[in-house]
C-alpha cells in the first residue's frame, strides 16, 4: 500500500518508509492513498475474534506487501501482550480500559506496535534512526518503554518543564541507554514546533535519519484504530450493535484512529470529541473556523494541545469537507473544576475511579446523552490512563489514597536523567547534530 502526504506535494511512499520518515518532506502527515475497506462479514463477526486477531486483520491491508503474515502476526502478538477491558457501569455507560499496558496508558498500543515494526524492518534497512517525540504526558513514557534498547534506534523525547505529572516524568526521563529526555522550558506546543521544524530542515535531514513516534507517525496511529473494533466485538456479544464513542482528545490521534476504523467499515453511530479548555476542535465542530490557540495548562495535561496536528488527517479522511466532519463528530470541552466534579461524582455513585482525561470523555458522553435523548446508542468512553498516574491531583481533591501498582514502584525510585533546554530551534538543532 502507498501513503501520501496530507499536503499533497510529495511522492507516495510505502508504509514502512512512511513510518521511518514520520513527517512528509512537504510538512504534511502521511495517510493511506486509499483507505482499505474490509468486508461486511468481518465487521458483523467481530465477536468471534480475540483482540490480536482483530488487530492482525485490520493491519494486514496496510503491511501485507512488506511483511509476511508470520512477521506481522509476531508484531501483533508481541506488541499487544497485555489485556484490555470493556467495563460496564450501572448507569449504562461503558468504559474501554486502555491502561493495562506496561506504562498504564493507551499510548502503549501505538508505541509498542511501532517499535516492533522498526525491529522487523531492521534487516531491510540498516541505517540508524533518530526518533523525535514531543510529549505532553503519556506518549513519552510509552515510547521510552517501547523503544528501550531497540537496536539501531535512538529516541529523543521533548517534554514541557513542570507540566507533566511526576510519575510521567519518572517513566520517560530515567531509562538512559538509547533514550534521551529533553526538559524544554516552554509548553507542549513549543516541543511540537521544535520537532516539526527539525523534520523540514533539509540540511539536518542530510546528517540524520529522523522519524517520529508522536501520533503524527502513521505507524503509531494505525493501532489506535484496532481497539474500537474490540469494543464493538464485546458489545456484539451482548446483542448491542448501535455504538457511539467518546474520546478524550489532545493531539487528536486517538479520534483519528476511530475515524479511520469507520472508513474501513467499522459500524459506529457517532464520535464525541472531548477536550479540556484547549478547545480549538470543539469550537470548530460548533461552526467556528479552525483557529489554533496557545495551549493552556490543565490537570488533564496530556490533552493540553492548542494546535492539534491530526486535525489535518481528520479533514483528509472527509475529503476536506468541514460539514461532513461536523456531521460525524460532536464536540465538548470542560474546565478543571468540571473535570474534578466528574471524577468525584462517578467515584461516589459508581465506585469507579477515572483519571482526569477519562473524566473529560465521560462527562462529554453524559452531556451527549442529555442533548440527544432520542439516541439508543450504547456510549463507550475511552479510558486513556490509570488514575494512579494522576494521584497527586486525585488524592488531594477526593481525600483518598490510590494504591501504587507494583509495576510502578521501580519507576518512582529511579533517578531523573533529563537535559534542560530552552525553546530555541537553534539550540535544539545544535544538540541533535552533536547527539
Image: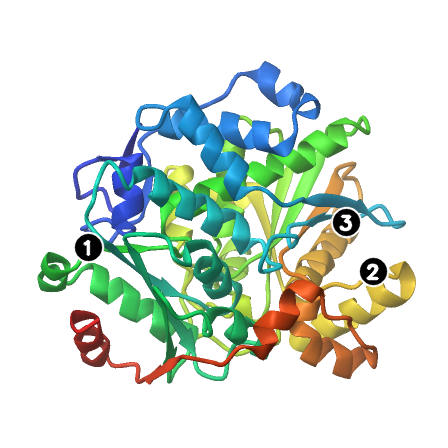
The crowding category of the residue bearing disc 1, from other C-alpha atoms within 10 Å (few below 14, some 14 to 19, many at least 20), is: some
Give the quarter of the image for residue 178: bottom left
Question: Could you tell me which quadrant the C terminus lies in?
Answer: bottom left
Measuring from the top left, give residue 368's x and y in whole percent. Answer: 72, 51
Q: Which residue is mark 1?
A: 209
Q: Which residue is mark 2?
A: 352
| Distance CA(mark 2)–CA(mark 1) | 45 Å
Mark 2 element type: loop
Q: Is residue 413 left or right of residue 186?
A: right
**Looking at the image, residue 142 lies above or below residue 62:** below
Question: Could you tell me which quadrant the N terminus lies in?
Answer: top left
Mark 1 element type: loop
**Looking at the image, residue 15 lies above or below residue 383:** above
The crowding category of the residue bearing disc 3, from other C-alpha atoms within 10 Å (few below 14, some 14 to 19, many at least 20), is: some
Q: Residue at x 60, y 76 (%)?
A: 412
Between disc 3 and disc 2, whose residue precedes? Answer: 2
Q: Residue at x 58, y 71 (%)?
A: 411
Measuring from the top left, give residue 308's x and y in whole percent. Answer: 42, 60
Q: Which residue is mark 3?
A: 369
Amino acid at each position: 500500500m502507498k501513503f501520501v502526504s496530507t499536503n499533497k506535494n510529495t511522492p507516495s511512499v510505502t508504509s514502512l518508509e512512511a513510518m521511518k520518515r514520520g513527517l512528509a518532506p512537504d510538512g504534511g502527515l502521511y495517510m493511506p492513498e486509499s483507505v482499505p475497506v474490509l468486508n461486511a462479514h468481518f465487521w458483523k463477526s467481530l465477536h468471534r475474534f480475540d483482540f490480536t486477531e482483530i488487530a492482525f486483520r485490520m493491519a494486514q491491508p496496510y503491511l501485507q506487501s512488506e511483511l509476511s503474515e508470520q512477521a506481522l502476526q509476531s508484531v501483533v502478538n508481541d506488541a499487544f501482550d497485555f489485556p484490555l477491558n470493556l467495563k460496564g457501569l450501572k448507569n449504562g455507560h461503558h468504559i474501554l480500559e486502555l491502561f493495562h499496558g506496561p506504562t498504564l496508558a493507551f499510548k502503549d498500543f501505538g508505541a509498542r506496535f511501532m517499535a516492533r515494526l522498526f525491529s522487523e524492518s531492521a534487516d531491510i534497512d540498516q541505517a540508524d534512526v533518530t526518533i523525535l517525540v514531543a510529549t505532553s504526558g503519556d506518549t513519552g513514557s510509552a515510547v521510552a518503554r517501547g523503544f528501550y534498547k531497540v537496536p539501531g534506534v535512538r529516541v529523543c523525547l521533548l517534554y514541557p518543564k513542570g507540566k507533566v505529572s511526576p510519575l510521567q516524568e519518572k517513566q520517560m526521563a530515567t531509562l538512559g541507554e538509547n533514550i534521551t529526555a529533553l526538559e524544554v522550558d516552554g509548553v507542549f506546543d513549543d516541543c511540537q514546533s521544535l520537532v516539526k521544524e527539525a523534520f523540514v530542515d533539509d540540511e539536518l535531514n542530510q546528517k540524520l535519519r529522523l522519524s517520529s513516534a508522536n501520533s503524527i507517525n502513521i505507524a503509531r496511529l494505525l493501532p489506535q484504530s484496532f481497539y474500537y473494533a474490540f469494543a464493538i466485538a464485546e458489545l456484539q456479544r451482548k446483542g448491542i450493535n448501535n455504538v457511539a464513542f467518546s474520546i478524550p482528545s489532545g493531539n487528536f490521534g486517538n479520534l483519528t484512529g476511530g475515524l479511520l476504523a469507520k472508513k474501513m467499515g467499522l459500524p459506529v453511530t457517532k464520535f464525541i470529541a472531548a477536550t479540556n479548555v484547549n478547545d480549538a476542535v470543539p469550537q470548530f465542530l460548533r461552526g467556528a473556523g479552525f483557529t489554533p490557540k496557545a495551549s493552556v495548562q490543565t490537570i488533564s495535561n496530556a490533552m493540553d494541545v492548542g494546535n492539534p496536528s491530526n486535525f489535518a488527517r481528520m479533514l483528509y479522511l472527509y475529503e476536506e469537507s468541514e460539514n461532513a466532519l461536523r456531521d460525524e463528530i460532536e464536540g465538548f470541552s470542560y474546565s478543571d473544576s468540571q473535570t474534578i466534579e466528574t471524577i468525584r461524582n462517578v467515584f461516589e455513585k459508581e465506585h469507579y475511579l477515572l483519571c482526569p482525561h477519562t473524566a473529560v470523555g465521560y462527562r462529554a458522553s453524559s452531556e451527549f446523552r442529555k442533548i440527544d435523548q432520542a439516541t439508543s446508542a450504547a456510549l463507550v468512553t475511552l479510558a486513556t490512563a490509570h488514575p494512579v498516574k494522576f494521584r497527586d491531583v486525585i488524592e488531594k481533591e477526593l481525600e483518598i489514597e490510590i494504591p501504587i501498582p507494583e509495576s510502578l514502584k521501580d519507576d518512582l525510585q529511579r533517578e531523573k536523567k533529563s537535559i534542560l533546554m530552552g525553546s530555541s530551534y537553534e539550540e535544539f538543532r545544535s544538540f541533535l547534530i552533536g547527539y
